Amino acid sequence: MTGTGATMHQEELHISAEIKDGIEELWVTSETTVIHLSIHVDTGEVRGFSCRLGPGMVAEMGGNRDVKTGHRYPGLFIFTEDGEHRVTSRKYVSKRHGGWIIEH
């Protein structure tokens, strides 16, 4: 593969973490980005994820449960928000019938 590499914008990242009631809350932030993970300390299982994708746009971990089997599968909630942090539109990225779909 040939070509020129993309230049990565240099942002100063900050990290903070706190453990409470067996859940570690991890925050990685910069001037424009916020990434959050909730991790079950005993198992290392990610219990929650969110990421600010840009001004007014956020992605969060979600999922759906199959009504027949009860099986839960991860997905994403992607939403936009106004200046007062009210959700203005939502999209759901989930797996159904063996394929990924985006729903409004």
Image: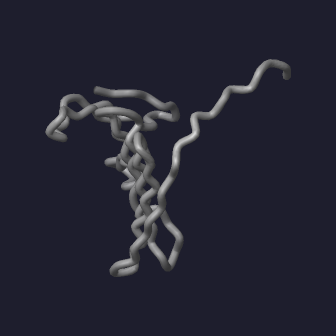
| x 18%, y 41%: residue | 85
Q: Nearer the viewer, residue 86 or 104?
A: 86
Considering every residue shown, the one lying at the far top of the view is 3
Rendered view: 44 above or below 92: below
64 sits left or right of 40 in the view = left
Rendered view: 34 above or below 88: below
Q: Position of residue 14 (x, y in %)?
A: 48, 57
Rendered view: 18 above or below 5: below
The image quadrant of residue 22 is bottom left
Q: Position of residue 23 (x, y in %)?
A: 39, 74
Rendered view: 37 above or below 93: below
Q: How many marks can you see?
A: 0
Q: Position of residue 65 (x, y in %)?
A: 35, 49
| x 33%, y 27%: residue | 103
Which colour scheme appears in the figure?
one colour
87 sits left or right of 54 in the view = left
The image quadrant of residue 1 is top right
Q: Position of residue 48 (x, y in %)?
A: 39, 58
Quadrant where the C terminus lies?
Answer: top left
Q: Nearer the viewer, residue 8 or 54?
A: 8
| x 50%, y 79%: residue | 42
